Image (cartoon, rainbow, N blue to C red):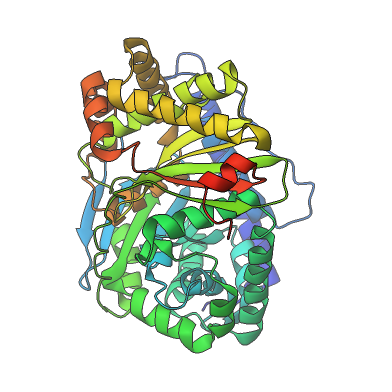
Amino acid sequence: MPNIMSEDSRISRKTLSMIILVVCIFIVLLYNLPGSRKPGETESGPLVVPENTTGQAVNHLDLESIEHIEKATKKSHKVRIESWNTPKGARVLYVQAAEIPMLDVRVVFDAGAARDGSLPGVAKLTNAMLTEGAGVADVDEIARHFEGLGADISTESYRDMALVSLRTLSDPQYRDEALSLFYDVVAQPTFPDNSLNRLRSKMQLSLQHEQQSPGALAQKAFFENLYGSAPYSSPPNGTELSLEAINEGALEDFHKKYYVASNMVVAIIGAIDRTDAELIASQLDKQLPAGQPAPPLGRIEALSAPADQHIHFPSSQTHIMVGGVGIKRGDPDWYAISVGNEILGGGGFSSRLNQVIRQDKGLAYSVYSHFTPMAAEGPFFVNLQTRADQTNEALKLLDTTLSDFVNNGPTDAELADAKRNLLGSFPLQTASNSNIAQYLGMIGFYNLPLSYLEKYPAAIEKVTKDDIKKAFQRVVHPNALLTITAGQADAEQDDSLGDGKP
């Protein structure tokens, strides 16, 4: 790990940082002068640069200011993705974006909760521990060093994947030191006992909070019932027993098995050239063992019959989740499913479920539908909250609305509105480096075509009513769905929604 900067070094870097910032602001202001805009580009609002009123290091504010510049100049642009593999088997996706002097590096491992095995929570805890100690640096030194360089590091863990992300200035004197420590965080975590105990206690507290949340209880029961013994049933936050069993050795074993080059995707976007991007990927490749890629997850079979569970909870509302097994990433019907879900329940107030259940009947405080395509078949579900005494009426209306949509598909007006919404919001999703980095990680992890972003608008525009109808009839089976309710129960619910055990 590089040495912590001296005070003289900090002062000189502050001066250079201010020069970089002033140049960036001048370029942005010049670019936005009347008549200087390229055809098809639109003005995105005034530039706002925060004043240094916090007493923090100026170079940290520089990164925040550059992020303000990025937001102020958001515009849709084509994303040219380059890709290659490292000698040890990591996949690299790189986009050069020279407009802003920033660099985003996103490292993705097939190391999510689906890989927990017999220790639920070990994936999330391993990922969270990466920044608690690395190389010769402890958690405080890591935090101070990244802050002093004006860099941000973050970790995230999901059911499919685990991430480590770095955002830094692209100037080599900032970038190189930030990357050096970043490599240590990814490849050489120390898993100190005091941090393990603290984070374990935090996760145990989260489990206690889940017991006080009917929504969290419903979601946990939904995944457990839907996936049974399959990997996606593992609760990402673990269990009381599993968290107590996770020790330093368990974290080291998990890291050694899954945080390896052949199990890694590296997403890079920023103001660096291909040579520098190759060097970054090469350094990550060298620091990690080759290892083995995680084995594919098995196919998840759809439910063959309806199932339900009611969780008694002292609440004036009932939280409801109804759904089943959905689709994998890369499913050829994804675009039809995406447009169809926008119509059914993903489009906010304009969706059919919201119109029928919330606006027409007043039976729900909120209602939405969602598909989560994953490495194996992810879930499809409808989520809503309603007054306890309206639970059965809401469930019946949900069933008839969903069945009608599956059997008959959308209207012409619904299809046009959904396409307009999806296509109208899409450019904003590729208007910042951080958003593109997320897409690069997704494309690499799920082995999607490099043309995914380029072809998305045309693929959405091409979807027909018949495409949606066929896709939903293949994937969604209204007569074989899982229903989870959490809340008060009336007599009718007690007869129809299971034994009442969590």
Left or right for 453, reference 102: left
Most foreground residue, 185 or 310: 310
Q: Quadrant of residue 330?
A: top left
Q: Is residue 274 visible?
A: no
Q: Residue at x 67, y 76 (%)?
A: 198
Q: Residue at x 31, y 38 (%)?
A: 477
Q: In the rendered view, would you say 202 is above or below 380?
A: below
Left or right for 201, reference 180: right
Count the numbered circles shown.
Answer: 0
Most foreground residue, 315 or 231: 315
Q: Quadrant of residue 148?
A: bottom right
Q: Residue at x 43, y 38 (%)?
A: 370
Q: Residue furthest bottom?
A: 249
Quadrant occupied by the C terminus: bottom right
Left or right for 490, reference 90: right
Most foreground residue, 470 or 39: 470
Q: Is residue 309 visible?
A: yes
Q: In the rendered view, would you say 449 is above or below 457?
A: below
Q: In the rendered view, would you say 47 is above or below 275?
A: above
Image location of residue 108, percent across then percent down? 38, 61
Image location of residue 105, percent across then percent down? 42, 57
Image location of residue 444, percent across then percent down? 28, 54
Q: Residue at x 42, y 25 (%)?
A: 401
Q: Residue furthest top?
A: 413
Image location of residue 63, percent across then percent down? 59, 49
Most foreground residue, 76 or 116: 116
